[in-house]
Amino acid sequence: MPKNINPESLAAPRGYQNGVLMEPGRLLFVAGQIGWDVEMNITSDSLTEQFRQALTNVLDVVKEAGGGPENIGRLTIYVTDKHEYLRETRSIGEAYRSVFGKTYMAMALVEVAALLHDRAKVEIEATAVIS
């Protein structure tokens, strides 16, 4: 089971954890997932909806391995426009909670010039520990 690591020497996290200690179990590395469906069609041009679909895709991989949101220790989120992400923070937070509930893990947000699929605005990779 995860143990949140949030030292008092750091700012209190909001919507993520500074660290998550996962033990015992097997490591699962989830490849970057974008907002597409089983036919590889981008589901929407909305960043928030692509975010929701990418998270759902991540969770589908974790579930297939026998886990759930509570098994995910880390997410890396790649976006093509950090300003769009900041404008949509509230709706992105709602999308996050609709998929993962109130399970928060260590996260990093990285702005990139582009993603492999021309219409993709977000890609999310994860590391999980499955007991």
Image: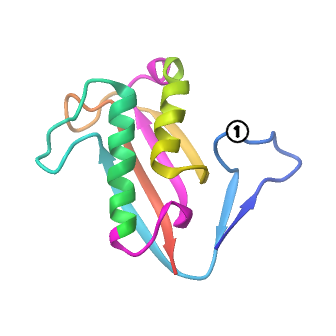
Locate residue 118, reporting x and y percent. Answer: 19, 29
Q: Is residue 79 magenta?
A: yes
Locate residue 76, reporting x and y percent. Answer: 48, 47
Which residue, as the protein is rendered here, is positioned at the far right?
Answer: 8
Q: Please report the residue visible at 40 percent of the width from the left and 75 percent of the height from the top.
A: 66
Name the residue carrying label 1.
Answer: 14
Element type where label 1 sits in the image: loop
Specify the segment rendered in magenta. Answer: 64-85
Question: In the rendered view, would you say 63 is above or below 117?
Answer: below
Q: Looking at this view, is 127 or 59 the one in front?
A: 59
Residue 41 lies in what quarter of the image?
A: top left
Which residue, as the protein is rendered here, is positioned at the far left?
Answer: 39
Residue 45 lies in what quarter of the image?
A: top left
Q: Is residue 76 magenta?
A: yes
Q: Please report the residue visible at 53 percent of the width from the left and 43 percent of the height from the top.
A: 97
Locate residue 27, reporting x and y percent. Answer: 47, 74
Q: Please report the residue visible at 28 percent of the width from the left and 35 percent of the height from the top.
A: 115
Locate residue 121, reporting x and y percent. Answer: 32, 30
Query: Is residue 124 rendered to the left or right of residue 11?
Result: left
Amino acid type at circle 1 is Arg
Q: Looking at this view, is 66 or 27 the one in front?
A: 66
